[in-house]
Image (spheres, grey):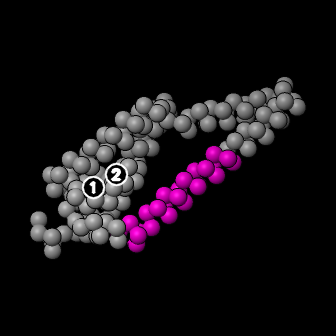
Amino acid sequence: MAKGSRDYKKLSRIAFQMWQDGTRDIKDIAKLLDVGDRTVSRWKSNGKWVELENEEAELERKTLIVARRVRLKALEEYEQNPHDKEVQSLVLLLRDIEKKAQPAKELLNYIIKFLDQTTNYFIEKGLLDELAMIQEHVPDLAEYLKAKNQGV
């Protein structure tokens, strides 16, 4: 494919996905996508990749803090009234939710490795349209696998 006819918007989305998936070396991303290092650096800067990742991490951190606080409050209520069936149920439910929120580390590592290798395969074969189509479904696929792994 001639560089002039390439869809750089699609390539920048693929580059961002690669970066999120752990390929942090700009030169590696540029080489895999057959674009210049400066192009990927510009995409990273203009797309605010680091800021987006930091915001997401901060949101996840705050969510975990709130979940812990709710669980602690429920445990305090349980301590004061251990015979209250509603409080018992709440504590068990919160513990179960917290447990299910943590996917099996081994499965998670396998999925990340699989998606990384799949991305590289499609890039090497020049199947960027197909890769973009697959990447559109990755969040739904991740949720599906997470639910299946938890027995939901």
Disc 1 marks which amino acid?
Asp
Position of residue 135 measured from the top left corner of the image (x, y, whole percent): 32, 53
In-front residue for pair 27/49: 27
Residue 106 in sight in this render: yes
Q: Which residue is mark 1?
A: 28
Q: Is residue 102 above or below residue 34?
A: above
Q: Is residue 118 magenta?
A: no
Q: Is residue 38 above or below residue 125?
A: below
In-front residue for pair 73/52: 52
Q: Quadrant of the N terminus?
A: bottom left
Q: Residue at x 73, y 35 (%)?
A: 90
Residue 14 in sight in this render: no
Q: Residue at x 29, y 51 (%)?
A: 134
Q: Which mark is residue 23?
A: 2
100 relative position to 120: left or right:
right
What secondary structure do most residues of the magenta stretch adopt?
A: helix
Which residues fall within the magenta stretch?
43-66
Disc 2 marks which amino acid?
Thr
Q: Quadrant of residue 10?
A: bottom left
